[in-house]
């Protein structure tokens, strides 16, 4: 039986986002089809996923307003997280954690936690000591964030469409002081 490839975390440059666009699209596609509430609803194609990375994330990484980390196993990109540091002048101490994703086939291995720890270190390097995020209320990610020291600031009912069902889901707004 061949050994599983070691998982490495690395910050992605704009060139990396271009290089991995197809795999990023596949990751997003797999997560949405697995029920993740990360901004998209079904039907959702691989092409839709690739378009998100190319149109929304790549320009932000190019300008430095978003910092992106990826988990890579061998040649396969299996997880990502983004840190949005494009804040208003009165918020130079704050950043938003966005789009934490781990491919469904690689979950429950500590990858999401490792990505969050990596993005928190980068936040500190950019003198950001208050992180915010939102997550669908009751989702599997909520206990992860709590275990990492995030606190719930509140719940907004009817915040977004469920990715697969005809209903509105609540979101929990969370924060952490580094």
Image (cartoon, rainbow, N blue to C red):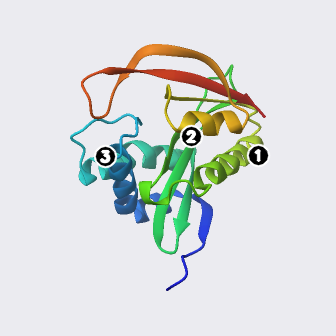
Q: Earlier in the sequence, mark 2 or mark 3?
A: 3
- The picture quadrant where one finds residue 151 is top right
Left or right of 176? Residue 169 is left
- Residue 14 numbered mark, or none: none
Indicate the position of residue 89 as horizontal and vertical percent values: 66, 23
View extreme (left): residue: 43
Give the residue displayed 33% in from the left and 28% down from the top. 162
View extreme (bottom): residue: 1
Left or right of 50? Residue 177 is right
Indicate the position of residue 51 as horizontal and vertical percent values: 30, 48
Q: Is residue 72 above or below residue 155?
A: below
Mark 1, secondary structure of its residue? helix
Q: Nearer the viewer, residue 108 or 5?
A: 108
Q: Earlier in the sequence, mark 3 or mark 1?
A: 3
Q: Nearer the viewer, residue 123 or 79?
A: 79
Residue 168 visible in the shown view:
yes
Q: Earlier in the sequence, mark 1 or mark 2?
A: 2
């Amino acid at each position: 039986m061949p050994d599983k490839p070691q998982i490495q975390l690395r910050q992605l440059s704009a060139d990396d986002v271009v290089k991995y666009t197809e795999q990023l699209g596949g990751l997003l596609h797999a997560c949405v089809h697995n029920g993740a509430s990360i901004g998209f609803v079904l039907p959702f194609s691989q092409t839709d996923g690739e378009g998100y990375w190319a149109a929304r994330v790549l320009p932000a990484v190019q300008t430095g307003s978003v910092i992106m980390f990826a988990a890579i196993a061998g040649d396969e990109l299996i997880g990502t997280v983004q840190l949005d540091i494009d804040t208003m002048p009165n918020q130079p101490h704050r950043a938003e954690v966005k789009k934490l994703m781990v491919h469904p086939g690689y979950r429950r291995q500590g990858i999401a936690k490792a990505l969050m720890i990596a993005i928190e270190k980068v936040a500190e390097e950019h003198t950001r000591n208050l992180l915010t995020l939102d997550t669908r209320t009751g989702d599997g990610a909520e206990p992860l964030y709590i275990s990492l020291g995030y606190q719930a600031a509140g719940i907004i009912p009817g915040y977004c469409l469920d990715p697969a069902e005809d209903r509105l889901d609540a979101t929990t707004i969370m924060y952490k002081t580094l």
